Image (tube, rainbow, N blue to C red):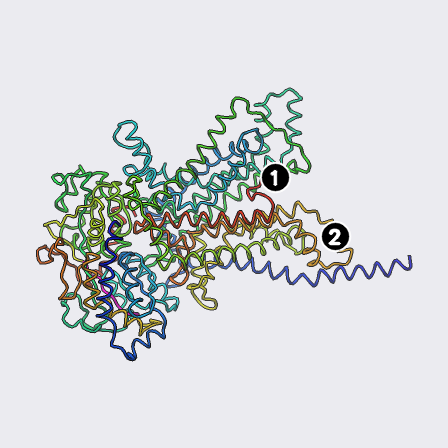
Amino acid sequence: MDLAAPAGSRAGPSRWLALDRSTPLWALLALVLVVLVLLPLAWLLASSLRGAEGITLRHYLTLATEPQYLQAVRYTLLLGLGVGLLSALVGAPMGWLVARTDLPGKRVIRALVLASFVTPPYLGAFAWTMLAGPNAGFLNKLFRDLTGAEGHLVNIFTTGGLIFVMFLYSYPYVFTMVANALELIPSELEEAAQMLGAGRSRTALSITLPLAAPALTGGFILGFLQALTLFGSPAILAMPAGVHTITTRIWALFQYPPRVEVAAALSLPLLLVAALLLALQRGWLGRKGYATVGGRGAARQVIPLGPWRWPALGFCLLLLALAVGFPYLILAKAAMVRAWAQPLTWENLTFQNLQFTWEYGATREALWNTLKLGILSATAGVGLATAIAYIVNRGLLRGAHVLTFLATAPIAIPGVVLAVGLFVAYTQPPLVLYGTVWILFVAYLTKEMPIGYAQADATFRGIHPELEDASRILGAGRVRALLDVTVPLARSGVVAAWCFIFIGAIRELSASILLFTSQSRVISVVIFDLKEEGHFGAIAVLGLLLLALTFLVVLGMERVAGRSILGSRE
Amino acid sequence: MRSSRSSIPLILALAAAVLMAARPAPGADPRLEAAKREGKVTWYTSVALTTAERIAKLFESAFGVPVAVNRTGSQRVLQRVLQEAQAGIKVVDVIQTSDAGHFVLLKSKGLLARYIPAGTEGFPAAFKDRDGSYLGWRATLSVIAYNPKLVPAAEAPRSWKDLLQPKWKGKLVKAHPGYSGIIATGMLALVKEFSWDYFRQLAKNGPMIVQSANDPAQVVASGERPVAADGAEYFLYSQRKKGNPLAIVYPAEGVPLVISPTAIARDAPHPAAARLFTDFIFTKAVQQLMADREGLYVPHPEVTYPADKPKLKDLKLLQVDAEELESRNQELKRTFAEIFGV
């Protein structure tokens, strides 16, 4: 005892000292997050209240009295509802089919879902103008040729068309959430229900569905948020029909004469709706509890589809053809021909699009900027998200739950809104970042923080602190224990987070469109510029290049991680 | 873009001509040396991207100074210039848009440097600024166009008023004055002629609204909409030359003539290169190339035009002066948004 006592008292202080030494690091990282998220929002609010004569509500009054703004808000909400419902209704069954049933070709389906996730929504919208424009669209021409009918089958320049195209690139969120949740729900409850005499459908309705419900509503909300925050798709499909959404309105308010204050005021309804949705979901989830979703060693029953196997596969493949197959085929055609609407003949074939795209000075510079920004923001983002998730999971700082909130909050900040805040914050001293790629870096880092954090958080939840504690008892400091024990265990989760941020940054348009200058163009902005002047061939070349580039990087990282980033645990 | 291969000799010949005309006498030209030291020239322009790239390449091969082309719509160019000036970012050297009103505004804000390019004394007065802060570099007509494969010539619209007929409902495409200076200027000219009522009635035919004055060419050629209610004539002309199914209508009621000025930014980071570039784009060789290859009208009095382009003196031209464009800019954009929704 006498010998043990001093040893114990020595161990005590050293443990605290170790904690003390790393605490400033955690505090600093937390501070970075606070500045990243709160600074643009504070500027946004301040800017929306700023008038020549001091604080004013005039800009909000403008919103309330000029009907075009309310019209944009109503239209955006309508889109959100449509996209959310459609994404949930299609993405969830698909997630269930892949996670739980004996559906054939699951690997292919997952790869194609990843392809639709990687496709920038504006590129999909652009491809669909070539597929389903009422007169020149490929599908409508085919329809007229086959049926001899006049008129068109589908018109993409309508509200329905816009909802459809937004849904095509939003459903992967629902798919992933539902598939992941179902893979974690053990089959025991379902088996119990069946032993108690419930049939398949009864089991599905009373056990599986309620358990998957949080993922389902989460998916609906993500779809809704996507529709709220997208800029490129409505700019390509709604504006030609004379309709604005909130995001395109905000962007238009930056044109000369700029009305940044009104843009800031118009940002707030968007922010509020998004935040409200998230709060609702959180409250609802909070009551339901996730206790059964533990998944450690749970065996999952594979549900045989029987005769439904092939129709189910057909359903999945049809969706993937619409999201990936047709769009990339028409892009490939447009890349190779002189006139995209003319048939594929020798006469029409050309290498000129390729050559023009390569020689156009902006292209290479923009590709380089995009790649650089993707890698930088993914690396910094993963570092920060992982550190924050670690702080929260190990309770290293007081008030850590505030950090969770801050790391998740940007999901409710549309890119355009974030850009307005960043524009105001960083076009004036002390820190003038506007005009450099660093303002885009800050935007991407902030915007992609939630997805990085969600991944990192899930990873640390799965790694019990016991292992780290063991290492600490053996004398390692906290940072050392983290690097030697936890990081290797967290590797695959961290790589997945890196990929998500990278993809998000590569396809970002809505914030970039307000923040770029001629010194800091990225590929999405170049594509948007080319679209406005109608250079279809060059856009197609760039779009395909972007897809190839993203896939290469993601596949390489998946190799490192040793698993699919869309969460297959097979 | 059918003619690319067959026209390579032509391009080479033109390039050689440009080189001969523009290259200074051997020996040290201090201006060229200064431009080379500056290393590049940054050009914000609204001319069609293909045109801009071609001129940039010619300049680089003549002087060894690369041109960073930033091509977007006139109104976006203005937005960029003003945003960057406000943030104190000095990037742009040469500013060129198709909305002469922009130059009145930029000049009043003190953002332009005075510079009168060499050899431009004999240019028509309509292209010149009193103080030499800017100079019209090219002129474009805003015209009607249609797809002759889908619309027989006998049924095609012949005048602006023809576009109001109900038979064009859902068949028209129109570009945006909030993007394009050609469209902004052209619309104001028509508003002065016919009042806003003309556009209120046009809106009833539900035109598809695109951004650039060059985009209608692609929309009409693809057949998505068979008739363009406005658009840049030079781009339609050069696209037709490349074999696209396009026919151009020069309405007898009057054709808006849009003069696109160019200027050097006061805070240009490469001022010597900017002056060299400005001189270059006003040389007869380059101006002739713009007329021959791009179908543009230019201020240089000695330039000759392709035989299949109408002579400006044969058309009834509608013009708006720069001051009026500047003073009615807001009215134009607001009323357009009110009528067409975006």
- Count residues near mark 1 (Cα–Cα under 10 Å), then give few for <14, some for 14-19, many for 20+: few
Determine whether B315 is above or below A309 in the image: below
Determine whether A119 is above or below A426 in the image: above
The percent position of residue A308, horizontal first and vertical second, equals 51, 24
Is residue B315 at all visible to an observer of this figure?
Answer: yes
Between A543 and A45, the residue placed more toward the observer is A543
- Position of A517 compared to A279: left or right? left
At mark 1, the secondary structure is: loop
Q: Quadrant of the C terminus of chain A?
A: top right
**Residue at image mark 1:** A569
For disc 1, the chain is: A
The percent position of residue A393, horizontal first and vertical second, equals 66, 50
The percent position of residue A531, horizontal first and vertical second, equals 33, 50
The percent position of residue A438, horizontal first and vertical second, equals 47, 62
**Segment colored magenta:** B258-265
At mark 2, the secondary structure is: helix
State the residue at coordinates (45%, 54%): A418
- Position of A411 compared to B56: left or right? right
**Residue at image mark 2:** A469
Between A138 and A33, the residue placed more toward the observer is A138
Instruction: Place residue A212 in its image quadrant.
Output: top right
Between A86 and A495, the residue placed more toward the observer is A495
Q: Residue furthest left?
A: B314
- Count residues near mark 2 (Cα–Cα under 10 Å), then give few for <14, some for 14-19, many for 20+: some
Type of secondary structure dominating the magenta stretch = strand
* Amino acid marked by disc 2: Asp
- Position of B218 compared to B320: left or right? right
Q: Quadrant of the N terminus of chain A?
A: bottom right
For disc 2, the chain is: A
Determine whether B219 is above or below A318 in the image: below
* Amino acid marked by disc 1: Arg
